[in-house]
Amino acid sequence: MVQQLIQQYINGEWMDSTNKSTIDVINPATEEVFAQVADGSAEDVDKAVQAAKTAFRSFSNTTVKERMDLLQRIIDVYESRKDDFITTISNELGATLFLSEKVHYVSGLEHFKQAKRQLETYSFEEKQGDTIIRKEAIGVSGLITPWNFPTNQTAIKIAGALAAGSTVVLKPSELTPISAVILAEVLHEAGVPKGVFNLVNGYGHSVGHAISGHPGIDFVSFTGSNETGKKISIRAAETVKKVALELGGKSPMIILDDFDMEQAAKIALSNVTFNCGQVCTLASRTFVPAHKETEFLQALKEIYDSYVVGLPTDKTTRIGPVISAKQFDRVQYYMKKGIEEGATLFLGGTGKPAGLETGYFVKPTIFTNVTNDMTIAQEEIFGPVMSVITYDTIEEALEMANDTIYGLAGYVLGNNRDTVKYVANEIRAGEISINGGATDYGAPFGGYKQSGIGRECGVYGMEEYLEVKAVLGFT
Protein backbone atom coordinates (compact mmCIF):
# COMPACT_ATOMS: atom_id res chain seq x y z
CA MET A 1 0.00 0.00 0.00
CA VAL A 2 1.38 3.40 -1.01
CA GLN A 3 1.55 5.92 1.84
CA GLN A 4 -0.12 9.23 0.97
CA LEU A 5 1.82 11.94 2.82
CA ILE A 6 0.92 14.76 0.49
CA GLN A 7 0.53 17.72 2.83
CA GLN A 8 3.04 20.35 3.91
CA TYR A 9 3.66 21.26 7.55
CA ILE A 10 3.34 25.04 7.83
CA ASN A 11 2.63 27.20 10.89
CA GLY A 12 1.97 24.21 13.11
CA GLU A 13 -0.56 22.59 10.76
CA TRP A 14 -0.68 20.03 7.97
CA MET A 15 -2.09 21.73 4.90
CA ASP A 16 -2.54 21.03 1.21
CA SER A 17 0.10 22.25 -1.20
CA THR A 18 -0.89 24.88 -3.74
CA ASN A 19 0.51 22.46 -6.32
CA LYS A 20 -1.73 19.41 -6.69
CA SER A 21 0.87 17.08 -8.23
CA THR A 22 2.81 14.61 -6.11
CA ILE A 23 6.24 12.97 -5.99
CA ASP A 24 6.68 9.20 -5.93
CA VAL A 25 9.11 7.85 -3.33
CA ILE A 26 10.78 4.66 -4.53
CA ASN A 27 12.23 1.84 -2.44
CA PRO A 28 15.66 1.31 -4.05
CA ALA A 29 15.74 -2.35 -3.09
CA THR A 30 12.47 -3.21 -4.85
CA GLU A 31 12.18 -0.35 -7.39
CA GLU A 32 8.57 0.04 -6.23
CA VAL A 33 6.74 3.22 -5.16
CA PHE A 34 5.99 2.95 -1.45
CA ALA A 35 4.95 6.54 -0.67
CA GLN A 36 4.00 9.89 -2.17
CA VAL A 37 4.68 13.41 -0.94
CA ALA A 38 3.65 16.87 -2.08
CA ASP A 39 5.38 18.43 -5.06
CA GLY A 40 5.71 21.80 -3.38
CA SER A 41 5.66 25.26 -4.92
CA ALA A 42 7.10 28.72 -4.43
CA GLU A 43 3.73 29.67 -2.90
CA ASP A 44 4.17 26.94 -0.29
CA VAL A 45 7.60 28.31 0.53
CA ASP A 46 6.23 31.82 0.86
CA LYS A 47 3.58 30.66 3.33
CA ALA A 48 6.24 28.85 5.34
CA VAL A 49 8.55 31.86 5.37
CA GLN A 50 5.77 34.17 6.52
CA ALA A 51 4.95 31.76 9.35
CA ALA A 52 8.61 31.55 10.34
CA LYS A 53 9.00 35.34 10.26
CA THR A 54 5.94 35.80 12.45
CA ALA A 55 7.24 33.25 14.97
CA PHE A 56 10.79 34.56 15.00
CA ARG A 57 10.52 37.48 17.41
CA SER A 58 8.88 35.42 20.11
CA PHE A 59 11.04 32.33 19.66
CA SER A 60 14.33 34.24 19.41
CA ASN A 61 13.56 35.81 22.79
CA THR A 62 12.97 32.52 24.59
CA THR A 63 15.35 31.76 27.41
CA VAL A 64 18.10 29.18 27.15
CA LYS A 65 16.22 27.10 29.72
CA GLU A 66 13.08 27.16 27.57
CA ARG A 67 15.01 26.00 24.51
CA MET A 68 16.75 23.28 26.51
CA ASP A 69 13.38 22.04 27.76
CA LEU A 70 12.06 22.06 24.18
CA LEU A 71 15.04 20.04 22.96
CA GLN A 72 14.49 17.51 25.75
CA ARG A 73 10.87 17.08 24.71
CA ILE A 74 12.01 16.56 21.12
CA ILE A 75 14.48 13.92 22.31
CA ASP A 76 11.77 12.10 24.26
CA VAL A 77 9.31 12.03 21.35
CA TYR A 78 12.06 11.15 18.86
CA GLU A 79 12.95 8.09 20.94
CA SER A 80 9.31 7.01 20.99
CA ARG A 81 9.32 6.91 17.17
CA LYS A 82 12.42 4.72 16.90
CA ASP A 83 10.79 1.84 15.01
CA ASP A 84 9.13 4.22 12.54
CA PHE A 85 12.45 5.91 11.75
CA ILE A 86 14.31 2.61 11.29
CA THR A 87 11.71 1.10 8.95
CA THR A 88 11.27 4.29 6.96
CA ILE A 89 14.98 4.94 6.42
CA SER A 90 15.47 1.38 5.25
CA ASN A 91 12.55 1.73 2.82
CA GLU A 92 13.47 5.10 1.34
CA LEU A 93 17.28 4.90 1.41
CA GLY A 94 17.85 1.16 1.10
CA ALA A 95 20.00 1.05 4.22
CA THR A 96 20.17 -2.22 6.12
CA LEU A 97 18.02 -2.37 9.24
CA PHE A 98 21.21 -2.51 11.31
CA LEU A 99 22.57 0.66 9.68
CA SER A 100 19.19 2.39 9.90
CA GLU A 101 19.16 1.85 13.65
CA LYS A 102 22.80 2.12 14.71
CA VAL A 103 23.78 5.01 12.42
CA HIS A 104 20.82 6.88 10.92
CA TYR A 105 18.39 6.77 13.83
CA VAL A 106 21.10 7.24 16.46
CA SER A 107 22.85 10.14 14.71
CA GLY A 108 19.65 12.16 14.52
CA LEU A 109 19.01 11.58 18.21
CA GLU A 110 22.56 12.46 19.23
CA HIS A 111 22.50 15.82 17.45
CA PHE A 112 19.48 16.91 19.49
CA LYS A 113 21.20 15.70 22.66
CA GLN A 114 24.38 17.56 21.74
CA ALA A 115 22.44 20.78 21.10
CA LYS A 116 20.88 20.57 24.55
CA ARG A 117 24.24 19.81 26.22
CA GLN A 118 26.04 22.76 24.68
CA LEU A 119 23.35 25.19 25.81
CA GLU A 120 24.20 24.31 29.41
CA THR A 121 27.50 26.21 29.19
CA TYR A 122 27.18 28.49 26.15
CA SER A 123 27.17 32.25 26.75
CA PHE A 124 25.06 34.36 24.38
CA GLU A 125 26.30 37.60 25.97
CA GLU A 126 29.67 38.73 27.25
CA LYS A 127 31.32 41.92 28.41
CA GLN A 128 34.33 43.47 26.65
CA GLY A 129 35.36 46.62 28.48
CA ASP A 130 32.40 49.01 28.22
CA THR A 131 30.90 46.96 25.38
CA ILE A 132 28.41 44.12 25.51
CA ILE A 133 28.88 41.47 22.81
CA ARG A 134 25.59 39.71 22.06
CA LYS A 135 25.02 36.62 19.93
CA GLU A 136 21.51 36.76 18.56
CA ALA A 137 19.50 34.38 16.38
CA ILE A 138 20.09 35.10 12.70
CA GLY A 139 16.43 35.05 11.65
CA VAL A 140 14.61 32.65 9.36
CA SER A 141 16.83 29.79 8.22
CA GLY A 142 16.21 27.84 5.02
CA LEU A 143 17.51 24.28 5.34
CA ILE A 144 18.05 22.12 2.26
CA THR A 145 19.13 18.59 3.11
CA PRO A 146 20.44 15.58 1.13
CA TRP A 147 19.15 12.05 0.68
CA ASN A 148 22.13 10.02 1.91
CA PHE A 149 21.71 10.76 5.65
CA PRO A 150 18.06 11.77 6.00
CA THR A 151 17.96 12.01 9.81
CA ASN A 152 21.55 12.98 10.48
CA GLN A 153 21.63 15.98 8.16
CA THR A 154 18.19 17.29 9.07
CA ALA A 155 18.84 16.92 12.79
CA ILE A 156 22.24 18.66 12.57
CA LYS A 157 20.62 21.72 11.05
CA ILE A 158 17.35 21.77 12.99
CA ALA A 159 19.02 21.20 16.36
CA GLY A 160 21.52 23.99 15.76
CA ALA A 161 18.82 26.38 14.60
CA LEU A 162 16.48 25.69 17.52
CA ALA A 163 19.31 25.95 20.05
CA ALA A 164 20.22 29.36 18.62
CA GLY A 165 16.62 30.60 18.58
CA SER A 166 16.24 30.63 14.80
CA THR A 167 13.05 29.63 13.02
CA VAL A 168 13.20 27.16 10.15
CA VAL A 169 11.90 26.24 6.70
CA LEU A 170 13.09 22.74 5.77
CA LYS A 171 13.23 21.21 2.29
CA PRO A 172 14.41 17.58 2.50
CA SER A 173 15.52 15.59 -0.51
CA GLU A 174 12.63 14.36 -2.65
CA LEU A 175 14.33 10.93 -2.66
CA THR A 176 14.15 10.47 1.14
CA PRO A 177 11.38 12.78 2.41
CA ILE A 178 9.41 10.39 4.62
CA SER A 179 11.81 10.50 7.57
CA ALA A 180 11.44 14.31 7.45
CA VAL A 181 7.66 13.91 7.67
CA ILE A 182 8.13 11.75 10.77
CA LEU A 183 10.50 14.36 12.19
CA ALA A 184 7.87 17.05 11.62
CA GLU A 185 5.41 14.88 13.56
CA VAL A 186 7.99 14.57 16.34
CA LEU A 187 8.49 18.33 16.55
CA HIS A 188 4.75 18.94 16.53
CA GLU A 189 4.13 16.46 19.35
CA ALA A 190 7.04 17.93 21.31
CA GLY A 191 5.30 21.31 21.30
CA VAL A 192 7.50 23.33 18.97
CA PRO A 193 5.60 26.64 18.70
CA LYS A 194 3.65 27.39 15.53
CA GLY A 195 5.79 28.74 12.74
CA VAL A 196 9.11 27.85 14.37
CA PHE A 197 9.51 24.74 12.20
CA ASN A 198 8.03 24.38 8.72
CA LEU A 199 8.39 21.52 6.24
CA VAL A 200 7.97 22.02 2.49
CA ASN A 201 8.48 18.92 0.35
CA GLY A 202 9.27 19.30 -3.33
CA TYR A 203 11.99 19.43 -5.95
CA GLY A 204 15.11 21.55 -5.83
CA HIS A 205 14.26 23.51 -8.98
CA SER A 206 11.03 24.73 -7.39
CA VAL A 207 11.16 24.60 -3.58
CA GLY A 208 14.95 24.82 -3.22
CA HIS A 209 15.11 27.64 -5.75
CA ALA A 210 12.40 29.55 -3.88
CA ILE A 211 14.14 29.10 -0.52
CA SER A 212 17.56 30.24 -1.72
CA GLY A 213 16.17 33.42 -3.28
CA HIS A 214 13.40 34.35 -0.86
CA PRO A 215 13.98 37.83 0.64
CA GLY A 216 12.39 36.71 3.91
CA ILE A 217 15.02 34.04 4.51
CA ASP A 218 18.13 35.30 6.28
CA PHE A 219 20.34 32.23 6.06
CA VAL A 220 20.53 29.15 3.84
CA SER A 221 22.23 25.97 5.03
CA PHE A 222 22.69 23.44 2.24
CA THR A 223 24.20 19.97 2.08
CA GLY A 224 24.58 18.33 -1.31
CA SER A 225 26.43 18.51 -4.60
CA ASN A 226 28.91 21.18 -5.64
CA GLU A 227 26.87 22.01 -8.71
CA THR A 228 23.75 22.76 -6.66
CA GLY A 229 25.74 24.55 -3.99
CA LYS A 230 27.10 26.98 -6.57
CA LYS A 231 23.59 27.67 -7.90
CA ILE A 232 22.32 28.33 -4.37
CA SER A 233 25.19 30.75 -3.70
CA ILE A 234 24.43 32.72 -6.86
CA ARG A 235 20.71 32.82 -6.09
CA ALA A 236 21.27 33.81 -2.45
CA ALA A 237 23.62 36.61 -3.46
CA GLU A 238 20.68 38.47 -4.98
CA THR A 239 19.43 39.20 -1.46
CA VAL A 240 22.90 39.11 0.16
CA LYS A 241 21.94 36.35 2.56
CA LYS A 242 24.41 34.24 4.46
CA VAL A 243 25.04 30.76 3.03
CA ALA A 244 26.64 27.68 4.58
CA LEU A 245 27.55 24.82 2.26
CA GLU A 246 28.60 21.24 2.99
CA LEU A 247 29.49 19.83 -0.40
CA GLY A 248 31.44 16.99 -1.99
CA GLY A 249 34.64 15.24 -1.12
CA LYS A 250 37.35 12.96 -2.48
CA SER A 251 38.92 12.07 0.82
CA PRO A 252 42.33 10.43 1.14
CA MET A 253 43.22 7.60 3.51
CA ILE A 254 46.97 7.54 4.07
CA ILE A 255 48.18 4.22 5.43
CA LEU A 256 51.64 4.55 6.99
CA ASP A 257 54.12 1.70 6.72
CA ASP A 258 54.16 0.94 10.45
CA PHE A 259 50.44 0.09 10.51
CA ASP A 260 49.19 -3.49 10.35
CA MET A 261 47.98 -4.15 6.79
CA GLU A 262 45.24 -6.59 7.81
CA GLN A 263 43.77 -3.99 10.12
CA ALA A 264 44.23 -1.31 7.45
CA ALA A 265 42.31 -3.42 4.94
CA LYS A 266 39.41 -3.84 7.37
CA ILE A 267 39.23 -0.12 8.09
CA ALA A 268 39.56 0.88 4.42
CA LEU A 269 36.97 -1.56 3.07
CA SER A 270 34.52 -0.82 5.89
CA ASN A 271 34.86 2.88 5.13
CA VAL A 272 34.37 2.66 1.36
CA THR A 273 31.31 0.40 1.64
CA PHE A 274 29.64 2.30 4.49
CA ASN A 275 26.15 3.43 3.47
CA CYS A 276 26.89 1.78 0.11
CA GLY A 277 29.63 4.35 -0.45
CA GLN A 278 27.11 7.21 -0.47
CA VAL A 279 29.06 9.35 1.98
CA CYS A 280 30.60 12.76 1.34
CA THR A 281 33.57 11.94 3.60
CA LEU A 282 34.20 8.55 1.94
CA ALA A 283 37.88 7.54 1.86
CA SER A 284 37.73 6.76 -1.83
CA ARG A 285 41.47 7.30 -2.41
CA THR A 286 43.56 4.82 -0.44
CA PHE A 287 47.28 5.64 -0.32
CA VAL A 288 49.45 2.62 0.47
CA PRO A 289 53.26 2.36 0.78
CA ALA A 290 54.47 0.79 -2.47
CA HIS A 291 56.37 -1.95 -0.64
CA LYS A 292 53.24 -2.88 1.35
CA GLU A 293 50.77 -2.93 -1.56
CA THR A 294 50.85 -6.70 -2.14
CA GLU A 295 50.25 -7.37 1.56
CA PHE A 296 47.41 -4.83 1.69
CA LEU A 297 45.69 -6.21 -1.41
CA GLN A 298 45.91 -9.77 -0.13
CA ALA A 299 44.29 -8.65 3.12
CA LEU A 300 41.50 -6.96 1.14
CA LYS A 301 40.93 -10.11 -0.91
CA GLU A 302 40.58 -12.26 2.19
CA ILE A 303 37.76 -10.15 3.66
CA TYR A 304 36.01 -9.01 0.49
CA ASP A 305 33.43 -11.80 0.38
CA SER A 306 32.24 -10.99 3.90
CA TYR A 307 30.83 -7.70 2.58
CA VAL A 308 27.57 -9.22 1.38
CA VAL A 309 25.38 -7.17 -0.95
CA GLY A 310 21.69 -7.90 -0.53
CA LEU A 311 18.24 -6.90 0.61
CA PRO A 312 18.23 -4.42 3.52
CA THR A 313 15.87 -6.69 5.47
CA ASP A 314 18.28 -9.65 5.32
CA LYS A 315 20.38 -9.85 8.49
CA THR A 316 23.38 -11.18 6.54
CA THR A 317 23.46 -8.09 4.30
CA ARG A 318 26.22 -5.54 4.89
CA ILE A 319 25.65 -3.44 1.76
CA GLY A 320 22.24 -2.44 0.44
CA PRO A 321 21.43 -0.75 -2.88
CA VAL A 322 22.36 2.73 -4.01
CA ILE A 323 19.52 5.25 -3.87
CA SER A 324 18.25 5.33 -7.46
CA ALA A 325 18.60 4.21 -11.06
CA LYS A 326 20.40 7.49 -11.76
CA GLN A 327 22.92 6.80 -9.02
CA PHE A 328 23.38 3.21 -10.23
CA ASP A 329 24.20 4.52 -13.70
CA ARG A 330 26.60 7.07 -12.24
CA VAL A 331 28.57 4.40 -10.37
CA GLN A 332 28.67 2.18 -13.48
CA TYR A 333 29.97 5.11 -15.55
CA TYR A 334 32.90 5.69 -13.21
CA MET A 335 33.78 2.01 -13.06
CA LYS A 336 33.95 1.91 -16.86
CA LYS A 337 35.91 5.16 -16.89
CA GLY A 338 38.49 3.69 -14.52
CA ILE A 339 39.02 0.71 -16.82
CA GLU A 340 39.20 2.94 -19.91
CA GLU A 341 41.88 5.13 -18.33
CA GLY A 342 44.10 2.17 -17.46
CA ALA A 343 43.29 1.30 -13.85
CA THR A 344 43.29 -2.40 -12.99
CA LEU A 345 40.02 -3.90 -11.78
CA PHE A 346 41.08 -5.89 -8.71
CA LEU A 347 37.72 -6.84 -7.17
CA GLY A 348 34.08 -6.17 -8.05
CA GLY A 349 33.25 -4.42 -11.32
CA THR A 350 30.31 -3.34 -13.41
CA GLY A 351 26.83 -4.85 -13.36
CA LYS A 352 24.68 -6.12 -10.53
CA PRO A 353 25.67 -8.88 -8.09
CA ALA A 354 24.33 -12.33 -9.01
CA GLY A 355 20.72 -12.89 -7.98
CA LEU A 356 19.94 -9.20 -7.50
CA GLU A 357 18.44 -8.24 -10.83
CA THR A 358 15.75 -6.08 -9.18
CA GLY A 359 16.94 -3.13 -7.14
CA TYR A 360 19.80 -0.68 -7.60
CA PHE A 361 22.53 -2.98 -6.29
CA VAL A 362 26.19 -2.50 -7.19
CA LYS A 363 29.32 -4.52 -6.51
CA PRO A 364 31.83 -3.04 -4.09
CA THR A 365 34.78 -2.38 -6.35
CA ILE A 366 38.52 -1.94 -5.87
CA PHE A 367 40.89 -0.54 -8.48
CA THR A 368 44.68 -0.82 -8.41
CA ASN A 369 47.34 0.84 -10.57
CA VAL A 370 45.44 4.10 -10.14
CA THR A 371 47.23 7.37 -10.70
CA ASN A 372 46.03 10.46 -8.91
CA ASP A 373 45.15 12.26 -12.14
CA MET A 374 42.63 9.62 -13.24
CA THR A 375 38.95 10.53 -13.24
CA ILE A 376 38.13 7.95 -10.55
CA ALA A 377 40.75 9.58 -8.30
CA GLN A 378 39.56 13.14 -8.88
CA GLU A 379 35.77 13.09 -9.17
CA GLU A 380 33.27 12.12 -6.50
CA ILE A 381 31.61 8.82 -7.41
CA PHE A 382 29.27 8.41 -4.43
CA GLY A 383 29.39 4.64 -4.50
CA PRO A 384 31.47 1.79 -3.00
CA VAL A 385 34.53 2.27 -5.20
CA MET A 386 38.10 2.32 -3.83
CA SER A 387 41.13 3.59 -5.73
CA VAL A 388 44.40 2.16 -4.40
CA ILE A 389 47.31 4.51 -5.06
CA THR A 390 50.88 3.68 -4.04
CA TYR A 391 53.52 6.07 -2.70
CA ASP A 392 57.21 5.93 -1.81
CA THR A 393 57.52 8.80 0.68
CA ILE A 394 55.16 10.53 3.07
CA GLU A 395 55.69 13.83 1.26
CA GLU A 396 54.64 12.19 -2.01
CA ALA A 397 51.51 10.82 -0.33
CA LEU A 398 50.65 14.24 1.08
CA GLU A 399 51.18 15.96 -2.26
CA MET A 400 48.77 13.55 -3.96
CA ALA A 401 46.29 13.65 -1.06
CA ASN A 402 46.03 17.43 -1.34
CA ASP A 403 45.94 17.43 -5.15
CA THR A 404 42.16 17.75 -5.34
CA ILE A 405 39.54 20.49 -5.50
CA TYR A 406 38.01 19.02 -2.34
CA GLY A 407 38.96 19.20 1.32
CA LEU A 408 36.19 17.67 3.39
CA ALA A 409 37.90 14.86 5.26
CA GLY A 410 41.03 12.74 5.54
CA TYR A 411 42.17 9.58 7.27
CA VAL A 412 45.51 8.52 8.72
CA LEU A 413 46.44 5.00 9.83
CA GLY A 414 49.71 4.71 11.71
CA ASN A 415 51.39 3.96 15.03
CA ASN A 416 54.04 6.64 15.45
CA ARG A 417 52.29 9.46 17.25
CA ASP A 418 54.49 12.25 15.89
CA THR A 419 54.26 11.02 12.29
CA VAL A 420 50.50 10.55 12.50
CA LYS A 421 50.07 14.06 13.88
CA TYR A 422 52.29 15.54 11.18
CA VAL A 423 50.35 13.82 8.40
CA ALA A 424 47.00 14.79 9.93
CA ASN A 425 48.09 18.42 10.18
CA GLU A 426 49.33 18.51 6.59
CA ILE A 427 46.15 17.17 4.96
CA ARG A 428 44.11 20.16 3.81
CA ALA A 429 40.68 19.09 5.01
CA GLY A 430 38.13 20.01 7.65
CA GLU A 431 38.03 16.69 9.49
CA ILE A 432 40.78 14.11 9.99
CA SER A 433 40.18 10.69 11.50
CA ILE A 434 43.11 8.82 13.03
CA ASN A 435 43.06 5.02 13.10
CA GLY A 436 39.29 4.90 12.68
CA GLY A 437 38.62 7.47 15.41
CA ALA A 438 35.20 7.53 17.05
CA THR A 439 32.39 9.92 16.14
CA ASP A 440 32.29 13.19 18.07
CA TYR A 441 28.90 14.93 17.73
CA GLY A 442 30.32 18.10 19.24
CA ALA A 443 33.21 18.43 16.80
CA PRO A 444 32.88 20.98 13.98
CA PHE A 445 32.23 19.47 10.56
CA GLY A 446 32.84 21.16 7.23
CA GLY A 447 35.30 21.46 4.41
CA TYR A 448 38.21 23.35 2.93
CA LYS A 449 38.36 24.46 -0.71
CA GLN A 450 35.35 23.39 -2.81
CA SER A 451 34.03 21.11 -0.09
CA GLY A 452 32.10 23.98 1.38
CA ILE A 453 31.74 27.06 3.53
CA GLY A 454 30.98 27.11 7.25
CA ARG A 455 30.68 24.38 9.85
CA GLU A 456 28.02 22.08 11.27
CA CYS A 457 27.72 20.18 14.58
CA GLY A 458 28.29 21.36 18.11
CA VAL A 459 28.96 24.94 19.09
CA TYR A 460 30.50 25.85 15.73
CA GLY A 461 27.39 24.58 13.97
CA MET A 462 25.04 26.48 16.26
CA GLU A 463 26.99 29.70 15.73
CA GLU A 464 26.17 29.58 12.01
CA TYR A 465 22.62 30.47 13.13
CA LEU A 466 23.78 33.47 15.18
CA GLU A 467 24.60 37.09 14.41
CA VAL A 468 27.05 39.08 16.54
CA LYS A 469 25.99 42.47 17.90
CA ALA A 470 28.16 44.98 19.73
CA VAL A 471 26.34 47.24 22.23
CA LEU A 472 28.76 50.14 22.85
CA GLY A 473 29.00 52.21 26.03
CA PHE A 474 26.55 50.04 27.92
CA THR A 475 28.36 50.23 31.26
Image (spheres, rainbow, N blue to C red):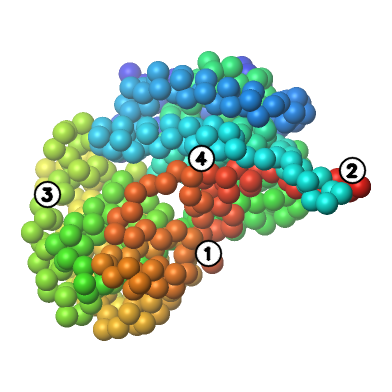
**Residue in the foreground of this view, choosing between 46 and 182:** 182
Q: Position of residue 18 (x, y in %)?
A: 64, 25
Tell me the number on the disc at residue 120: none
Q: CA distance from mark 3 to mark 1?
A: 35 Å
In primary-sequence order, the first of circles 2 and 4 is 4
Which amino acid does the dot numbered 4 rest on? Ile
Which residue appears at 51% of the width and 45% of the height? 457
In primary-sequence order, the first of circles 1 and 2 is 1
Q: Are marks 2 and 4 in contact (CB under 8 Å)?
A: no
According to the picture, the residue beneath numbered tag 3 turns out to be: 306
Which amino acid does the dot numbered 1 rest on? Tyr
Which amino acid does the dot numbered 2 rest on? Thr
Q: Position of residue 85 (x, y in %)?
A: 37, 27
According to the picture, the residue beneath numbered tag 2 turns out to be: 475
Q: Give the label, 2 or 3, closer to the camera.
A: 2
Q: Give the label, 3 or 1, closer to the camera.
A: 1
Which residue appears at 15% of the width and 46% of the height? 308
Q: Position of residue 208 (x, y in %)?
A: 60, 42
Circle 2 SS class: loop
In primary-sequence order, the first of circles 4 and 3 is 4
According to the picture, the residue beneath numbered tag 1 turns out to be: 448
Mark 1: few/some/many CA within 10 Å (<14, 14-19, 20+):
many
